Structures are given as structure tokens and as C-alpha cells.
């Protein structure tokens, strides 16, 4: 996993990076806020460690700018400022954690591991829920809502809708649908897929102005708000 570290104390930065690398993290060290934000734009990281009092752009402003684009990557502030007001300021800018210097490296490692576990769990939960326009599909509970109203679907209707949603707006062919939803290669000249698409349209689209299930003639079907 990759960590981007903002710390202008060269000794602390070197020692901290060396410690984290022994725990199988890859650490990139940056010494001012401007370079840090440039690095964020150019490469992806799994966690950010930010000192507050650094040159050019301080860590609090860096945190705020990151959150304008990225709500998910964990951010830990590491600072000599230990007042409650300082911590409050960091959390108001959507930092995930705050550690006051001097601290034991082992404690920082535990906090990093905790945030990574939490973030991975949240990613899995998000993967189980699809939202398109006012349509919500919950794979875990096998429930579908549109406009806040639950829509009852059969097993195959639900599987078909999920398959369309997982395509994320891409067109899927009749053959792809039969292979994934019916798990067999029956004759795609039959109208089974069209029948179930029509079933879904009556339940998902009929009573709503914005239609979500679309046909791309000669290619297949896709789910998207137009």
C-alpha cells in the first residue's frame, strides 16, 4: 500500500518512512504543501499523512483541497499542535485522525491499519449498492427502490437489473445477458431477453418521466439516465 507523507522535518520524515516501509508500506516523502498537491494530482495513494506546519501550503489547507476532489482516501494529521481547537479545525476539514507529536511510531501504524480496514469495509458496502438517478439497487438485501418506493422484482428480473447496473452504462448484448443471468447459451433468437426487459421497464420506468432502461438497436441494452 502507498502512503504520501507531508513532513518538513527531514530527520522525522526519514525515520518515519523507514519504519513504515518495514511494515510493507511504500512511502513517498514530500516536504511542502505545494509539491504534495502536485503529487496527489499525478499519482494515487492509499493514505495521506499530513503535518500542519509546513512550507508554502499548510497541512490543513492541503487536507481541505484534497477533500474537494477525494472524499475517501484516509487522512491522518501529525502535528505538534495539541490544543482541542487545532484538532477541531482538522476534523472540520474532514481529516480522519489526528496524532500529536511526539508519538510512538507503533501507535501511528495501528491507526493507519485501522483506517485502511475501515475504508476497505466501506468500499465493499458501496460495491453492493448501485444508484442511478432516483433508482437504488441493494444487492445485499436484494431490494430495489425508485423515487423512495420499493419495487417488487422476481429473482430473474433482479438479476437482470443488477447485471445492467454493473455494466455502468455500457451496452450489454443479449448473449452476455443470457450467459450471466440465465447462465446458459440458449438460442439468442428467442425473445426471452426482450420479455424480461419489458417486465423491467413496466416496473422501473413506466411511472417515471426519466427512463433508465434503453435499447441500442443491433447491440443490446444499457441502464443510464438520459
Image: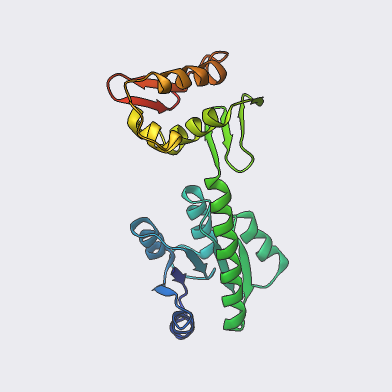
Please state the horizontal and vertical placement of residue 162, each as a whole percent of the image. Answer: 50, 35
Residue closer to the observer: 4 or 215 = 215
Q: Looking at the rendering, which quadrant does residue 75 occupy?
A: bottom right
On screen, residue 81 above or below 67: below
Q: Quadrant of the C terminus?
A: top left
- The residue sitting at 58% across, 13% down in the picture is 207
Given the current orientation, which residue lies at the most extreme right position? 84
Q: Quadrant of the N terminus?
A: bottom left
On screen, residue 186 above or below 74: above
- The residue sitting at 42% across, 21% down in the picture is 192
How has the structure been colored for display? rainbow
- The residue sitting at 61% across, 84% down in the picture is 104
Please give left or right for residue 181 compared with residue 151 in the image: left
Q: Looking at the rendering, which quadrant does residue 219 occupy?
A: top left
Residue closer to the observer: 143 or 58 = 143
Given the current orientation, which residue lies at the most extreme left position? 218
Residue 109 appears in view: yes
Residue 30 appears in view: no
Please give left or right for residue 126 compared with residue 3 in the image: right
Please state the horizontal and vertical placement of residue 28, each as a whole percent of the image. Answer: 39, 72
- Count of numbered tags: 0
Please state the horizontal and vertical placement of residue 144, each as a whole percent of the image. Answer: 60, 31
On screen, residue 78 above or below 208: below
Residue closer to the observer: 172 or 88 = 172
- The residue sitting at 41% across, 64% down in the picture is 36
Amino acid at each position: 500500500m502507498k502512503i504520501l507523507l507531508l513532513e518538513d522535518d527531514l530527520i522525522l520524515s526519514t525515520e518515519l518512512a523507514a519504519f513504515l516501509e518495514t511494515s510493507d508500506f511504500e512511502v513517498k516523502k514530500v516536504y511542502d504543501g505545494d509539491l504534495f498537491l502536485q503529487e496527489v494530482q499525478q499519482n494515487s495513494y492509499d493514505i495521506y499523512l499530513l503535518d500542519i506546519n509546513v512550507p508554502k501550503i499548510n497541512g490543513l489547507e492541503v487536507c481541505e483541497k484534497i477533500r474537494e476532489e477525494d472524499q475517501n482516501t484516509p487522512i491522518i494529521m501529525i502535528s505538534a499542535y495539541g490544543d482541542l481547537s487545532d484538532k477541531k479545525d482538522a476534523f472540520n476539514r474532514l481529516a480522519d485522525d489526528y496524532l500529536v507529536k511526539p508519538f510512538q511510531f507503533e501507535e501511528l501504524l495501528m491507526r493507519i491499519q485501522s483506517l485502511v480496514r475501515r475504508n476497505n469495509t466501506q468500499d465493499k458496502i458501496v460495491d453492493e449498492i448501485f444508484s442511478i438517478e432516483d433508482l437504488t439497487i441493494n444487492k445485499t438485501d436484494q431490494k430495489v427502490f425508485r423515487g423512495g418506493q420499493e419495487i417488487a422484482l422476481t429473482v430473474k428480473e433482479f438479476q437482470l437489473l443488477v447485471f445492467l447496473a454493473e455494466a455502468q452504462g455500457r451496452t450489454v448484448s443479449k448473449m452476455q445477458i443470457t450467459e450471466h443471468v440465465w447462465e446458459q447459451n440458449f438460442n439468442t433468437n428467442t425473445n426471452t431477453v426482450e420479455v424480461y426487459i419489458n417486465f423491467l421497464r413496466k416496473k422501473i420506468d413506466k411511472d417515471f418521466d426519466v427512463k433508465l432502461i434503453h435499447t441500442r438497436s443491433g447491440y443490446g441494452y444499457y441502464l443510464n439516465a438520459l
